[in-house]
Amino acid sequence: MQSFVYSYPTKVYFGQGAARQALEAELSHYGPNVLLAYGGGSVKRTGVYDALVAQLKAAGKTVTDFGGIMSNPTYAKVQEGAKLAREHNIDLILAVGGGSVIDCCKIVAAQAKTDEDVWEMEFTHRRLPAEVIPMGAVVTASGTSAEMNGGAVITNEDKKLKAGMAAAAPRFAALDPAYTLTLPMPQVLSGAFDTLSHAMETYFGHSDGDNASDDVALAVMRNTVVNMRRVLKDKDDLEARSNLMWDSAMAENGILKVGRKTDFQAHQMEHQLGAYTDCNHGQGLAVIHPAYYRHIVKDAPEKFARLGQVVFGLPADARPEAAVDALAAFIAECGLPTKLGQLRSTVTIDKDLLRKVADSCNLIPTNPRPLTHDEVYDILCECL
C-alpha cells in the first residue's frame, strides 16, 4: 500500500424518507436562501420537487430555481447557475437529480464565490477554488456517485473538452432508492454500468499484491452485476435498487482508491466522445470497455483472470481473455449498446470525428499499459 491521507466530508442519509430526514437535520445550519437545482421535468412529474419545496419553505427558506441542467453539463450552464447564486445571495445549493445535476452544482458552488474563471484557474494556472457555497444532494438517479466526492465532469463546448474538475464534496447527501423506481430502465442500467466501470477502472490501476482495495473493488463489481440482473428480472425490486445505489456510492467515495493508482482510461475516451457528441455516459462506457480491454488484457492477465472468476463466475483455468468476453456478453444481456452507432447521438459518429476524439483524449500513465493517441483511435474505430 502507498501512503495516503483519507478523510470523508459527506454525511449520508440512506433509505426510505432519506431526503426529508436530511433536510430536517441539516437546513438549520445554513442561511435563508436556497438554490434548488434539477434537470428536466421528472422531479416535478414524480412529486419530488413539490415535496422538497414545501419542506424548504416550511423551514423558512427562500427558494430560487435553477432547472434545465442537461446530461453532460456544460460550462455555460455552470456560469448561468453561478450568476443566479450571486444575484440571490445563495447560502445553500440543493442539487436534486443524478450525476449531471450534482456535478454542475459543485462547480457552480465554486464559480459563484470568485470573479476568476474557474476553468482557467484549474487548467491554466493549476490552482483550485479556495471557497465554495455549501451544497447538499438529493439523489434521484444513482450510478455516478457524484454525491460522494468533490470531483465534477464538465463539458466546455467552446474548447471541445469534457474534463474532470475539482471543487468541494456535498456537505450531505440523501439516497432514497425508491426515487429510482420512476427511472426508465435504460437509465437505471446505464447508471449501474457506470458504477461497474468505476470499480473496474480502479481495479486495473497499479496496486500491490493482496491489496485490500482490489478485494473490495471486486466485491463491488460482483454485487453490481448480481443486482443488475435482479432488476432486469423485476424492475420494481427495491432491494436490488438499494444495493445498486450503495454500490454506486462505494465505487466513488474514495475507499477503493486509497493506497494505489487508478486507470480510468476508458472514462477519458468516453469523456472526449461526450465532448463531441451527446451520447449517454454509461452507454458510451459499455461500448468502449470491451474494445479497450481487448487491447490491454495481455498486460494484466492475472487481474483479468481474477475478475472473470470473482465477478462472472468463470472457472479457475479460464483464459484472461474469457473475462473480456464475459463482460461483453453481460453488456449485451443488459440490452446496453455494443456499438457507437447504437448510442442515438444526434451527431454523426464517423472516423473523422473519432480522430478528433482520439487526438484530444487524455492519456493515463497508470493503466496496465499506457496508450498512444493512435491506439485510442484504433480502439474507437473498433467500436463502430
Image (cartoon, rainbow, N blue to C red):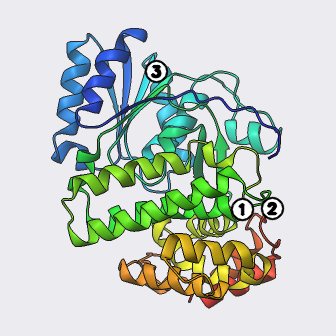
Residue farthest toward the front in the current orientation of the protein? 316
Q: Residues within 10 Å of mark 1 (few under 14, many from 20)?
A: many
Indicate which disc, 1 or 2, sits on the residue closer to the N terminus: 1
Examine the rendering and report whether any part of residue 161 can be seen. Answer: no
Query: From the viewer's perspective, is the residue at label 2 or at label 3 nearer?
Result: 2
Examine the rendering and report whether any part of residue 315 can be seen. Answer: yes
State how many labels appear. 3
Indicate which disc, 2 or 3, sits on the residue closer to the N terminus: 3
Residue 148 is situated, as x and y percent measured from the top left of the image, at 52, 39
Q: Which residue is mark 3?
A: 87
Q: Which residue is mark 1?
A: 263
Q: Residue at x 63, y 90 (%)?
A: 382
- The answer to whether residue 269 is left or right of residue 371 is left
Q: Which secondary structure, mark 1?
A: loop
Callout 1–callout 3 Cβ contact below 8 Å: no
Residue 230 is situated, as x and y percent measured from the top left of the image, at 29, 67
Callout 2–callout 3 Cβ contact below 8 Å: no
Callout 1–callout 2 Cβ contact below 8 Å: yes
Q: How far apart are the alpha carbons under marks 1 and 3?
A: 41 Å
Q: Residues within 10 Å of mark 2 (few under 14, many from 20)?
A: some
Quadrant showing the C terminus: bottom right
Image vertical order of residue 203 relative to residue 38, above or below:
below
Q: Which secondary structure, mark 3?
A: helix
Q: Residue at x 81, y 61 (%)?
A: 366
Q: How far apart are the alpha carbons under marks 2 and 3?
A: 43 Å
Indicate which disc, 1 or 3, sits on the residue closer to the N terminus: 3
Tell me the quarter of the picture where residue 91 sits.
top left
User: Residue 366's mark?
Assistant: 2
Label 3 amino acid? Glu
Q: Which secondary structure, mark 2?
A: loop
Label 1 amino acid? Asp
